[in-house]
């Protein structure tokens, strides 16, 4: 009986990956970006952790999912500025898609 307990402990720890490895694999699936300021009044900036701003497709959606036509300006490889001044007050979703890595992310922001 004493020999079975360590064997079971070894088997269960070997069958599942350590927590750090699972978290790193999950983080690689999405595009890492920060949106600021939130809430926004005139502009929203999207800052990417990697130089993917020019190859990423961005779309602003209202809360029910309709795509909105907004002005977007690529500042450099790491940042995009979106004009939200003309949008009504409310919550919006920013969908980001990188076609090269086939990654997607969605960020929520409030327009005041």
Image (cartoon, rainbow, N blue to C red):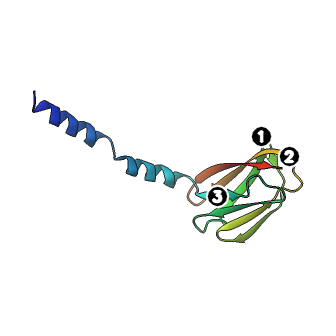
Q: CA distance from mark 2 to mark 1?
A: 11 Å
Do residues under tags 2 and 3 come within 8 Å of each other at their CB atoms?
no
Please give the name of the residue rendered at 79% of the width and 55% of the height, measured from the top-left corner.
Answer: 40
> How many neighbours does mark 2 have within 10 angstroms: few (below 14), some (14-19), or many (20 or more)?
few
Residue that carries the numbered disc 1 in the rendered image: 63
Circle 1 SS class: loop
Q: Residue 59, image x and y in percent? A: 74, 53
Q: Residue 64, image x and y in percent? A: 78, 37
Q: Residue 48, image x and y in percent? A: 62, 63
Quick check: 37 above or below 110? below
Q: Residue 63, image x and y in percent? A: 77, 40
Residue 68 left/right relative to 54: right
Residue that carries the numbered disc 3 in the rendered image: 34
Quick check: 95 above or below 2? below
Please give the name of the residue rendered at 83% of the width and 61% of the height, measured from the top-left corner.
Answer: 71
Do residues under tags 2 and 1 come within 8 Å of each other at their CB atoms?
no
Circle 2 SS class: loop
Residue that carries the numbered disc 2 in the rendered image: 89
Q: Quadrant of residue 84?
A: bottom right
In the image, 104 versus 26, the foreground residue is 26
Q: CA distance from mark 2 to mark 3?
A: 21 Å
Which quarter shows the N terminus?
Answer: top left
């Amino acid at each position: 009986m004493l020999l079975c307990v360590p064997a079971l402990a070894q088997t269960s720890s070997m069958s599942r990956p350590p927590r750090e490895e699972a978290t790193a694999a999950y983080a690689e699936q999405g595009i890492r970006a920060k949106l600021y300021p939130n809430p926004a009044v005139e502009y929203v900036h999207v800052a990417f952790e990697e130089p993917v701003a020019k190859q990423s497709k961005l779309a602003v959606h209202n809360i029910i999912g309709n795509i909105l036509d907004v002005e977007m300006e690529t500042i450099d490889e790491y940042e995009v500025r979106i004009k939200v001044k003309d949008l009504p007050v409310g919550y919006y979703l920013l969908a980001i898609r990188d076609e090269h890595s086939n990654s997607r992310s969605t960020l929520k922001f409030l327009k005041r």
